[in-house]
Amino acid sequence: MADADVLDEVFEVIENRKETLPEDSYTASLFTHEKGENAVLEKLGEEMTELVLAAKDDDHEEIAHESADIVYHMLVLLSMKGMDLSDLRTELEDRR
Ligand SMILES: N=c1c2ncn([C@@H]3O[C@H](COP(=O)(O)OP(=O)(O)OP(=O)(O)O)[C@@H](O)[C@H]3O)c2ncn1[C@@H]1O[C@H](COP(=O)(O)O)[C@@H](O)[C@H]1O
């Protein structure tokens, strides 16, 4: 599966969780967190630090794990802000 398909699929699930707020969903818990958007912002900060440590250790498995955590939480943030993947794609395409 192409990377773009995975991103689209995960974003679609995030949008669905935002709308339906299932009780057992981690994504939904971010949208309803008492800290508001700070919950996802703090998570992004923590995971960025973990990525830096994984890179310093040259731990490729951990680098991939932390990168995926960051991408997922970044997608949640985009959804929280009423943005979507097209905003990200447009920004990247404009830089080519
Ligand atoms: N990609 C993710 C994803 N990445 C991370 N997380 C959750 O984020 C939480 C915190 O992540 P951490 O990595 O900080 O957790 P941790 O155990 O402290 O791990 P370390 O980094 O410290 O090793 C954990 O509960 C993870 O399960 C995610 N939760 C959900 N998704 C996607 O969202 C979909 C919907 O999930 P639900 O909303 O839970 O139904 C899933 O099918 C996935 O595709």
Image (tube, grey):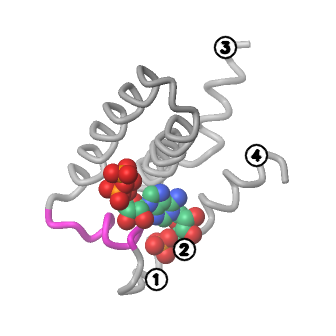
Percent from the top left, x then y, of residue 86?
65, 42
**SS under mark 3:** loop
Instruction: Give the residue pinned by disc 2.
Output: 16
Can residue 14 be seen here? Answer: no
Nearer mark to the viewer, of 4 and 1: 4
Is most of the magenta stretch helix, strand or loop?
helix
Percent from the top left, x then y, of residue 70?
45, 42
Percent from the top left, x then y, of residue 23?
35, 86
Instruction: Give the residue pinned by disc 4.
Output: 4
Q: Amino acid at mark 4?
A: Ala
Q: Residue furthest left?
A: 34
Numbered label tally = 4
Q: Amino acid at mark 1?
A: Thr
Instruction: Say whether residue 36 is left or right of residue 82.
Output: left
Nearer mark to the viewer, of 3 and 4: 4
**SS under mark 2:** helix
Q: Is residue 35 above or below residue 26?
A: above
Of residue 67 and residue 29, the one placed in the foreground of this image is 67
Q: Residue at x 47, y 48 (%)?
A: 69
Q: Which mark is residue 95?
A: 3
**SS under mark 4:** helix
Q: Is residue 53 above or below residue 31?
A: above
